[in-house]
Amino acid sequence: MRSSLWAASVLCATALSAPTYSTSAAARSVEMRVLSGYFQLLGRKVQDEKNMAQAPVCNMNNAVMPIASPTSLPPPSTGLTLKHVAIGRGTQNYSCRANETAAPVALGAVATLYNASCVAAIYPDLLSVLPNVALQFELTDIDQATLSPSNLAISGHHYFSNLTTPIFNLSTTAMDLGFATCAKNNSVAAPAGEPTGQDDEGFGAVTWLKLLTRGGATGNLKEVYRVNTAGGKPPTTCAGMPATFEVEYAAEYWFYAS
Ligand SMILES: *[C@@H]1O[C@H](CO)[C@@H](O)[C@H](O)[C@H]1NC(C)=O
Ligand SMILES: *[C@@H]1O[C@H](CO)[C@@H](O)[C@H](O)[C@H]1NC(C)=O
Ligand SMILES: *[C@@H]1O[C@H](CO)[C@@H](O)[C@H](O)[C@H]1NC(C)=O
Ligand SMILES: *[C@@H]1O[C@H](CO)[C@@H](O)[C@H](O)[C@H]1NC(C)=O
Ligand SMILES: *[C@@H]1O[C@H](CO)[C@@H](O)[C@H](O)[C@H]1NC(C)=O
Ligand SMILES: *[C@@H]1O[C@H](CO)[C@@H](O)[C@H](O)[C@H]1NC(C)=O
């Protein structure tokens, strides 16, 4: 591949579906701001790559996880190495079965994961905006092959087996990085100013997390982080909410293995 093509080929889909959430002029203006910021950054990478002798090298040792929210998550345990970085795009689900003053109860998440390992290694600034960019596009199908508006390929699925058990299945026809049932180790609030939801009209960004895999995980997966979250929080109370509902979100997931 010609060096000048890496960023464009990986991060800019040739057939770009339009964002689908624009309900108001204000919402469309948020989408335009988010997307134009992304494509300007991408354009600068393409320009830089034109002046490089060879394509940028994807070395996972260069990827640095942004774990410092206002307070920091504990770092990955000694001896683990970064195996995969994914952008997750999906929904956080909640229930409102008590009364209007109660807070919504988290039911878990359903998300599709996309391989962003090399973006993490080469272009951390682009990676950090991808959750908010991805949030502006609808996920049409949990098996959608690529993450709009990029060409990042599906690398797995994330869901819950019960209220406290997140699962990551990093297995697709193209790659098999393992399967892990997890438990929460730590959580910290997302930094102020993180994307609050689609069109910036949501209730906030879900917490950043450190998860530990439970026994039986494959692919030597040991620890999973959720950082740079965009959207996903519910309203503070159940007033006016249905018995169950979903809130759109996206995030970076970092997978560490022994
Ligand atoms: C509403 O539900 C919450 C959670 O179950 C409960 O703690 C609270 O007492 C309830 N309030 C009223 C007014 O029923
Ligand atoms: C979340 O919502 C999706 C879509 O309705 C549904 O398929 C899934 O079972 C829900 N998950 C949970 C944990 O409620
Ligand atoms: C992830 O994508 C990169 C290219 O961006 C590729 O080199 C790498 O093999 C992919 N990872 C997996 C597990 O397929
Ligand atoms: C949820 O699943 C985990 C892992 O399978 C299990 O250890 C735990 O007991 C389950 N919790 C409940 C409340 O069923
Ligand atoms: C993981 O996902 C793949 C592809 O969707 C599926 O074939 C496989 O059965 C899943 N593995 C588990 C343990 O659920
Ligand atoms: C889990 O969290 C606790 C409390 O923050 C911490 O002391 C411990 O080291 C963590 N465990 C791992 C394996 O990271």
Image: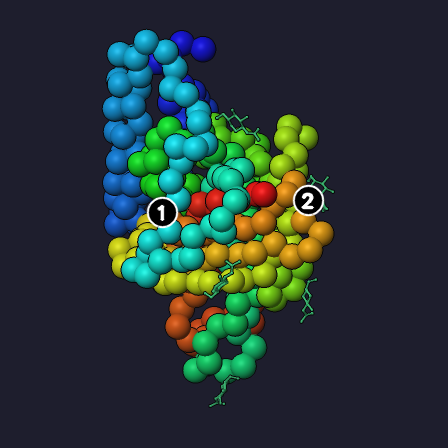
The residue that appears at 67% across and 59% down in the rendered structure is 161
Q: Is residue 189 above or below residue 102?
A: above
Q: Residue at x 42, y 75 (%)?
A: 237
Give, as a three-letter code, the residue at label 1: Pro
Please provide percent x and percent y for residue 179.
Answer: 66, 45
Comparing 88 with 178, the one in front is 178
Mark 1, secondary structure of its residue: loop
> Which class describes the residues within 10 Å of circle 2: few (<14), some (14-19), or many (20+)?
some
Q: Is residue 250 visible?
A: no
Rendered residue at 34%/41% (across/down): 129
Q: Nearer the viewer, residue 203 or 175?
A: 175
What residue is shown with label 1? 66
What residue type is disc 2 on? Thr
Q: Quadrant of residue 8?
A: top left
> Residue 81, percent across and down?
51, 40
Badges 2 and 1: C-beta atoms under 8 Å apart? no
Q: Is residue 254 placed above or below 208 in the rendered structure?
A: above
Q: Is the residue marked by circle 1 packed among few (<14), some (14-19), or many (20+) residues within 10 Å?
A: some
In this picture, residue 159 sits left or right of residue 63: right
Task: Point out the image quarter for the N terminus.
Answer: top left
**Residue 218 got which mark?**
2
Disc 1 residue lies near ligand 6 with CB under 8 A: no
Instruction: Please tell me in which quarter of the rendered image ligand 4 is found.
Output: bottom right
